[in-house]
Amino acid sequence: MRLAQCHNFHDFRTLARRRLPGPIFNYIDGGADDESTLRRNSASFEAVDLVPHVLRGVKEVDLSTTIMGQKLALPFYLSPTALQRLFHPQGERAVAAAAAKYGTMFGVSSLGTVALEELRAAHKTPQVYQFYFHKDRGLNRAMMQRAKAAGVEVMMLTVDSITGGNRERDKRSGFSIPFRLTLGGMAQFALKPMWGINYVTHPKFSLPQLDAHVKMGGGTMSIGRYFTEMLDPTMTWDDLAEMVQDWGGKFCLKGIIHPDDATRAADAGCDAVILSNHGGRQLDGSRSPFDGLAEVVDTVGDRLDVIMDSGIQRGTHIVKALSLGAKAVGLGRAYLFPLAAAGQAGVERMLGLMKDEVERDMRLMGAARVADLSRNNLRFR
């Protein structure tokens, strides 16, 4: 299979699987425990039917939207994810460039492998910084100040990862950073020598947002220990309110599901909430963001922007989320598989295909603008 033969999420996933060693593919692909939430995230969209209007005279379709004061050409963006240069040598550089080409937002993770300053200087498209709350309050303030100095527009605090999820696929292969593979895991690396050649011939990568605290090999701390030892599980709503005030700019809370938490986020001064269960990688059995979307929109949609991620694989998924009241949706695996398969060219192809899907779907729905979509377009089975 070649990139030109990839037409949807599943095609990109297949090509990524052929190119990545098994432990790395499963790190992207897998979820927590029995992976029931991972499966539910996408399956939840199937419980809702689209009910199109016809004869609306839709000549042009405007896909633009505004979230947290940022104008996007598309109603979907590339969510921040960790370790991208592990999947492809271009990593975040490819993702940021593809997002800029299509005029949408991208995110940089605290566990990213390219410095946020480099990406901010290279591209003018809106950039968010995905942040974890550390026990060291001084470190939290320093990281926020660094992002502000770089010109990052939006701070995105992730709150569903105060401890790492139980990802049993990684346990079976021994996948960790630094690598501590099982014999079976090492054998799978041997089957994909091209990945290894790229790994050793490209500059060694680190975690530039946290390089003084987490090392990718033989250093101070593994990624697993980072979650269990450096992050603060005692964080409270008072801590959030203080962080919002310290940032002083656009701020969103990522990883909520309960509408009461959305209300408290609005009370704390957040500009947006992102319904997310971390792609099914944290608490297995938790509610899917799409299933919880309407309740959160009804609760706080008049006070802040409601966004969702987890499970988006199709343009129709995006149209359904927008119809329920989401202002935009975030993509994760949907661009990581194309990245792993073909770098920047893969991410650009995915974005182009998804843009075409959403535009076609809206035209078939009789909707010329995102604002034309509403719950009147949906029926729950």
Image (cartoon, rainbow, N blue to C red):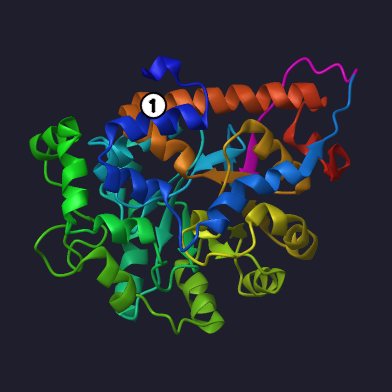
Position of residue 354 relative to residue 273, above or below, is above
Q: Residue at x 68, y 52 (%)?
A: 290
Callout 1: 10 Å neighbours few (<14), some, many (20+)?
Answer: many
Q: Which quadrant holds the C terminus?
A: top right
In the picture, measured across the screen, residue 377 lies left or right of residue 75, that is right
In the picture, measured across the screen, residue 343 lies left or right of residue 204, that is right
Instruction: Tell me if residue 124 can be seen.
Output: no
Q: Residue at x 62, y 37 (%)?
A: 75
How far across and how far down the image is residue 145, in percent? Answer: 34, 65
Instruction: Tell me if residue 65 can be seen.
Output: yes
Position of residue 30 relative to residue 334, above or below, is below
Per the rendered image, the range of residues in magenta is 55-67
Q: Residue at x 63, y 44 (%)?
A: 328
How far across and how far down the image is residue 371, in percent? Answer: 77, 38
Q: Which residue is mark 1?
A: 346
Mark 1 element type: helix
